[in-house]
Image (cartoon, rainbow, N blue to C red):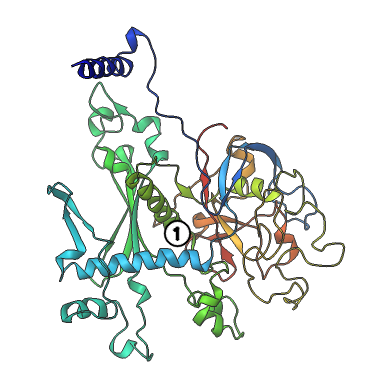
Amino acid sequence: MKKLLIFSVIALLLGSCSGDGGGELVGVYSKSWKEPSPYGMLYIKRGSFTIGQNDQDANWAMTSQSKTVSVDAFWMDETEITNGEYRQFVHWVRDSIAREKLSLVDEEFKITQDKKGNELKKPILNWKKEIPWSKPNEDQQIAIDSMFYMGEDDIDIFPQLNAMILSYQYSWVDYIQAAKKENKFDVMRGSYNRSIEGLGVTKDSADVMIRKDTSYYNEQGHIINKTIYKELKKRSDFISKKRINIYPDTLCWIRDFTYAYNEPYMKLYFAHPGYGEYPVVGVSWEQAQAFCHWRTNLFNGYQIKNGGVRVQDFRLPTEAEWEYAARGGKDLSMYPWGGYYVRTAKGCFLANFKPQRGNYTDDGYLITSRVASYPPNDFGLYDMAGNVAEWTSTAYHESNYSFVHDMNPNYEYNAKSSDPEVLRRKVIKGGGWKDVSIFLQCGMRTYEYQTENRSFLGFRCVRSYIGMD
């Protein structure tokens, strides 16, 4: 009886502590939490710096004036994304497609009920069920064979995966459109401001239309990404979808350099284990975006499954974030290592680039090198100059620095399917193995079209830091 009384008193005290707070404003707080260091990423503390070229400049090449800006803290990949890391993405997409196909002939590849036996609103793939790559039954064999080249397309003695089927679909909320005043939800009317009734306009008027990206397969099985316009009625109208093939374009090794024998790189640079620690190339800006979305879901899915807390999204760095990280805390420095020269005092090169006309090899490499082959900058980041140029999230405009904000500056533009090529330009930074030294400068900027795949262009991810510590 005494034990029961003590238990009741404790329960009462706990209930009062977690209830109304004794009539006082005590707030709602969870347990203390400190963001753990993500694997392979480094913490870049917040700070200010002068963005843009601030030293040597080729004649008439400076397209923007320098500007002092501030950026918040973030995590950044220590190196560029490697072939091995990108293969994890490719294998995940491959396995998800295989399980989807196998679920049509074997129900065990889909989960339709939760642990309590309740029917799920939408069945999910069963990732615990092994894919029978080596010993499938007859029905499973047909499903698996549909993922490989067959008939006249199959010319190899070994089964060759059809990379054209490796598509990844993802969705995102267009917060820029949602934040516009004219798109605000009117709680008095119970509808969005931009509505036919609210504005008194015709249904065909552009005043009530918002843009939305959508994706689907056509009758021939080809991916169609299209921009549509529709009346704003509900939250889902702000949600866009995109479907994209995610396998690197290995033919870029031949396409980028005419009258050159680069077939060996085209055949094995991405797939061979010998290149696992080399930076992935042949990945477009859109494919890099898809990788970031997958990486976010991979990490947050694990966190939630194990009782953790979700974190900020993985994404491409803005131009300002990339340049700030490249400088390594050395404002107004020409190169990431802080000096004015691309050699050490002993004459050793400090990055992988094209040292002289026709001479690619004096730095020790002909094409890309293993990541982290050269010393890091003062932030501990490798290859912020040379090896491969890197995508940023920033849309390219010659006058970016003139109109962007001085706090977390960024110019973002999501090109419509009908836009001309000039609106599909994205800023790339750092220079690559085929570039001369001026492109290695921290403040140097150039562009590439978001749908292009290049043999000298890769990427790395960042993740915004949570908190102020």
In the image, is residue 178 above or below residue 141? above
Q: Quadrant of residue 134?
A: bottom left
Q: Secondary structure at mark 1?
A: helix
Can residue 452 be seen?
A: no
Quarter holding the C terminus is top right
Which residue does the image show at 66% across and 57% down from the upper left? 384
Q: Quadrant of residue 14?
A: top left
Closest to the observer, 10 or 230: 10
How many numbered circles does the render carry? 1
Closest to the observer, 46 or 178: 46
Which residue does the image show at 50% across and 78% down from the upper left? 272
In the image, is residue 336 above or below residue 204? below
Looking at the image, the residue that sits furthest to the front is 2
Quarter holding the N terminus is top left
Disc 1: CA contacts within 10 A as few (<14), some (14-19) or many (>=20):
some
Residue 124 in picture, x, y percent from top left: 22, 56
Residue 196 in picture, x, y percent from top left: 24, 33
In the image, is residue 318 above or below residue 364? above
Which residue does the image show at 79% across and 62% down from the upper left? 342
Left or right of residue 73: residue 198: left
Amino acid type indicated by mark 1: Glu
Closest to the observer, 201 or 456: 456
Residue 351 in picture, x, y percent from top left: 72, 64
Which residue does the image show at 16% across and 78% down from the upper left? 139
Residue marked by disc 1:
286
In the image, is residue 287 above or below residue 329? below
